[in-house]
Image (spheres, grey):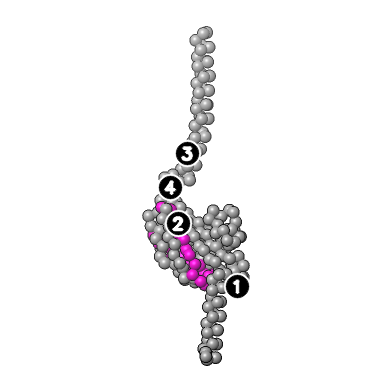
């Protein structure tokens, strides 16, 4: 026969374990960060919408303040934050199971070497998927309210061959050159006509 004290302890353990499992089921956290050659990134942070709503109400403030991109010893802030409820079709990598996603966009320095990621709303472990610009992909499990391991960023970012200002100047030149050629040829044809008239006289 099981002593009453042992039965009570077993019941408490089962309740705590059940609460932990249900909390994990509620969060459904998934994070993916995709990098491009020019240093730009897109980070998708997906959670169960009901759980996310409760967490944001209990911890007020903008969502961008709940995540940290720690790059080579300093924080890189996202330049834009979009909210997509319930696997919006605008998401290219929607999770397909009714999750709400915050999409953060920004730029890494071209000489960035390492990244550590932190997401302050979660408690339970979640997968973090990194898609590098050179095609390599890694997945690690982040232990809930903890920092990721150091993520290698080196060697994947490159400056574009032409910057935006140079491209703008080239486009303007391409638009102006035909006008100049037309003006010059029209002036020459007028001069030729005048020469022909003078020659006949």
Q: Disc 4 or 2, which lies upstream in sequence?
A: 2
Q: In the image, which residues are magenta? A: 113-134
Taking the spot 52% from the left edge, 26% from the top edge, the residue there is: 182
**Mark whose residue sits in front, 3 or 2:** 2
Label 4, label 1: how many angstroms apart (C-alpha)? 44 Å
The residue singled out by tag 1 in the image is 58
The residue singled out by tag 3 in the image is 170
Which is more toward the observer, 136 or 14? 14
Mark 3 in CB contact with mark 4 (< 8 angstroms):
no
Tag 3 secondary structure? helix
Label 4, label 2: how many angstroms apart (C-alpha)? 20 Å
Q: Disc 4 or 1, which lies upstream in sequence?
A: 1
The residue singled out by tag 4 in the image is 160
The residue singled out by tag 2 in the image is 131
Tag 1 secondary structure? helix
Q: Disc 3 or 1, which lies upstream in sequence?
A: 1
Mark 1 in CB contact with mark 2 (< 8 angstroms):
no
Taking the spot 62% from the left edge, 67% from the top edge, the residue there is: 50
Taking the spot 47% from the left edge, 38% from the top edge, the residue there is: 170
């Amino acid at each position: 026969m099981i002593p009453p004290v042992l039965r009570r302890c077993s019941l408490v353990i089962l309740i705590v374990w059940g609460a932990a499992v249900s909390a994990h089921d509620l969060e459904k956290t998934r994070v993916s960060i995709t990098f491009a050659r020019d240093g730009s990134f897109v980070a998708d942070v997906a959670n169960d919408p009901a759980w996310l709503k409760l967490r944001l109400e209990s911890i007020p403030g903008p969502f961008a303040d709940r995540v940290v991109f720690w790059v080579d010893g300093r924080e890189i802030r996202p330049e834009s934050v979009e909210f997509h409820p319930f696997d919006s079709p605008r998401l290219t990598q929607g999770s397909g199971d009714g999750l709400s996603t915050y999409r953060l966009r920004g730029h890494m320095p071209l000489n960035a070497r390492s990244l550590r990621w932190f997401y302050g709303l979660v408690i339970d472990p979640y997968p973090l998927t990194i898609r590098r610009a050179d095609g390599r992909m890694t997945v690690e499990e982040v232990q809930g309210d903890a920092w990721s391991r150091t993520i290698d960023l080196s060697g994947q970012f490159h400056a574009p061959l032409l910057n935006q200002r140079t491209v703008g100047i080239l486009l303007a030149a391409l638009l102006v050159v035909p006008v100049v050629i037309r003006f010059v040829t029209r002036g020459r044809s007028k001069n030729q006509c005048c020469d022909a008239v003078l020659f006949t006289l």
